[in-house]
Image (cartoon, helix red, strand yellow):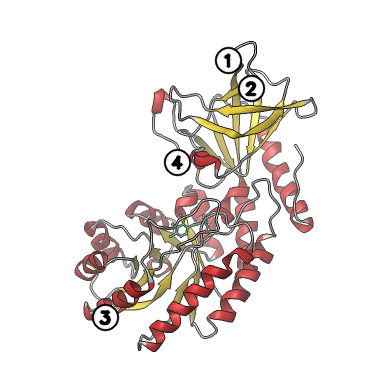
Amino acid sequence: MTVHFAPDAALFAVASTSRLDAYVATRRFDKPTLVMDLDRVETQYRALHAGLGRADIHYAVKANPARQIIARLVDLGSHFDAASRAEIALCLEEGADPSEVSFGNTIKRASDIAWARDQGITLFAADAAEELEKIAENAPGASVYIRLVVETSPGDWPLSRKFGCDRDMALRLLDMAKALGLNPVGFSFHVGSQTRHAEMWVPTLDVMAGIWQAAIDAGHDLTMLNIGGGFPAFHGEPIDTPTLYAAKVMEMVEARFPDVPRIMAEPGRGMVAEAGVIVAEVLLVSRKSDRDMHRWVYLDIGRFSGLAETEGEAIRYQFDTARDGDPMGACILAGPSCDSADVLYEKRPVLLPQTLRAGDRVLIRNTGAYTSTYSSVCFNGFPPLDVVVI
Ligand SMILES: Cc1ncc(COP(=O)(O)O)c(C=O)c1O
């Protein structure tokens, strides 16, 4: 497999890959296993922090909630974006201060809001009137930020439509929050996960800046802008280093929001994806007839056991095998379950060695984000993706 990195990212990636490779090379795995390199998470945190400057990093816990990752990030001074009661509890157990944990899900259970308030959480996201009512009732006086919808996401894994509200509603929600006795501090948005180039943020930032100005003109004293996630990982196409990417984003943010006292960023994928490798195994290589042009390669991991982001072939993982020096051929890649939706890549087939056969090990690169928790509990009797943190 040929891997292209931006020049200074190359050393970085190779160093980390070799630590993971050294670990997996000396071990046997009897089920698909995600191996996470904690030091690489730290390197990634430091790199993002260097580029993000004065912005507070709130790690999006959903990307990978491994306890050791949260503990390391607490030590490094990271803050956290939690989506649920369980994620808040995890962060607090690992030593995060409640003032450093935001409850960023716009869809919350009322009792979880009350529980979070009791734990000392003071910052909540909302994008609807009913959510503000819930927060006002269960966490009176809390600070809230209103999530804005991103109409056209440039990310490979868009987060548009389901989340956020439009400009007019956002302005009304600020008024409503005040009337309910809450403290509306600002706005958030998410440009879309795996937004490969910083320049792709421009249209979203331009729209957000217009809405921000409209809120100021309407008399709101906004103090916080949450720029969400979107920071990419290497999934086959060249990307900037985390520091350069984050610095470019911040330059564009500062140019449009020069006087905002507080900026939050919520990297998830960009923090952990490249710190993980999944060790998988080929279960079967077959063709459907003697005339079949397509070789099917079935792995012991699929759409339901961790690789959910292959939905729509959106995220394209990189595969390494011990036979990569042999002639390569296109194949359809599928998972092991008895479900026909468990096909990973078919529209754009994957190049794998023609000599590949059952029993061969396959390393799936840069899979530290959005894999372990997407893995089903027991679909077809397969255990959830195993996670080892080194
Ligand atoms: C509110 C929020 N913030 C941050 C993130 C992390 O995004 P990313 O992994 O693209 O950095 C997500 C991802 O779903 C999110 O929902």
Look at mark 4 in the image and give the residue it sits on.
374
Label 3 vs label 2: CA separation?
61 Å
Lower position in the chain sequence, tag 1 or tag 2: 1
Q: Residues within 10 Å of mark 3 (few under 14, many from 20)?
A: some
Q: Quadrant of residue 304?
A: top left
Q: Split into 4 quadrants, where in the image is the N terminus?
A: top right
Secondary structure found at label 3: helix
Question: Given the image, on which type of amino acid does mark 2 rest?
Answer: His
Lower position in the chain sequence, tag 4 or tag 1: 1
Question: Given the image, on which type of amino acid does mark 1 rest?
Answer: Lys
Secondary structure found at label 1: loop
Q: Position of residue 205 (x, y in %)?
A: 53, 72
Vertical placement of 151 versus 382: above or below?
below
Look at mark 3 in the image and give the residue it sits on.
178
Question: Given the image, on which type of amino acid does mark 3 rest?
Answer: Lys
Mark 4 or 2: in front is 2
Look at mark 2 in the image and give the residue it sits on.
294
Q: Split into 4 quadrants, where in the image is the C terminus?
A: top right
Mark 4 or 1: in front is 1
Look at mark 1 in the image and give the residue it sits on.
288
Label 4 vs label 1: CA separation?
30 Å
Q: Position of residue 274 (x, y in %)?
A: 63, 48
* Residues at discs 3 and 2 in contact (Cβ within 8 Å): no
Task: Say which residue appears at 35% left-offset and 54% top-offset.
Answer: 84
Q: Position of residue 339 (x, y in %)?
A: 43, 25
Q: Is mark 2 within 8 Å of ligand 1?
A: no
* Residues at discs 4 and 3 in contact (Cβ within 8 Å): no
Secondary structure found at label 2: loop
Lower position in the chain sequence, tag 4 or tag 2: 2
